[in-house]
Image (cartoon, grey):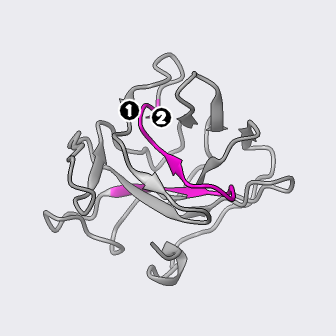
């Protein structure tokens, strides 16, 4: 998957807050998300669902089996990812639609069991062992588009 930034017009306010996200030294990270999808990517049902992009920053392929996404800090693996292989510098799109879809066919869309709040909330990507790979508590508000660059200088 190519970067979604090229596919979505950024008419919304982009926010920059370097202290908003904390990270582990992880192969996967939340690279982009859209919390108010008014006219961007549509899902298989034609809905403008919120979405989260996961980026593999490592030089090796990473399988997402048992990684988690959550919008609730008390439920670290509120939604666990099925087995998908993300190649080096590859990306995986997960819709935050509350549809809770984990199809086994890799060409079908993934849908988490929660939606993102446009007023800012907790958002995290959790490694299989429970370590937080990407975390924001809360992500900036109001937000309808955010891009995260996640080595040392983090932009939101």
Which residues are the magenta region?
50-71
* Picture coordinates of residue 51, whole percent (x, y): 40, 56
Residue at the disc numbered 1:
80
Residue at the disc numbered 2:
67
* Picture coordinates of residue 72, whole percent (x, y): 47, 26
61 part of magenta stretch: yes
View extreme (right): residue: 152
* Picture coordinates of residue 5, whole percent (x, y): 54, 76
Camera-nearest residue between 36 and 50:
50
Are there few (<14), some (14-19), or many (20+) residues within 10 Å of tag 1? many
- Asked whether residue 140 is in view, the answer is no
Camera-nearest residue between 96 and 59:
59
View extreme (left): residue: 45
Camera-nearest residue between 35 and 91:
91
Mark positioned earlier in the residue sequence (1 or 2): 2
Q: Quadrant of the C terminus?
A: bottom right
View extreme (front): residue: 60
Q: In which quarter of the image is residue 15?
A: bottom right
Are there few (<14), some (14-19), or many (20+) residues within 10 Å of tag 2? many
Judged from the image, the secondary structure of the residue bearing numbered disc 2 is loop
Q: Residue at x 20, y 43 (%)?
A: 99
Apparent side of residue 156 relative to residue 144 in the rendered image (left or right): right
Apparent side of residue 98 relative to residue 151 in the rendered image (left or right): left
Camera-nearest residue between 116 and 75:
75
Whole-Å distance between the Cαs marked 1 and 2? 6 Å
């Amino acid at each position: 998957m190519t970067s979604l930034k090229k596919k979505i017009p950024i008419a919304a306010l982009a926010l920059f807050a370097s202290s908003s996200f904390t990270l582990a030294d992880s192969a996967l990270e939340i690279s982009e998300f859209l919390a108010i999808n008014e006219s961007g990517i549509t899902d298989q049902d034609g809905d403008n669902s919120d979405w989260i992009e996961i980026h593999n920053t490592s030089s090796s392929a990473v399988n997402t089996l048992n990684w988690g996404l959550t919008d609730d800090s008390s439920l670290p693996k509120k939604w666990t990812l099925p087995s998908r292989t993300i190649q080096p510098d590859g990306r995986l799109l997960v819709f935050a639609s509350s549809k809770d879809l984990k199809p086994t066919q890799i060409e079908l869309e993934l849908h988490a069991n929660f939606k993102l709040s446009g007023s800012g909330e907790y958002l995290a990507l959790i490694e299989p062992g429970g370590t937080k790979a990407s975390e924001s508590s809360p992500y900036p508000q109001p937000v309808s588009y955010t891009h995260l660059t996640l080595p040392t200088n983090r932009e939101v």
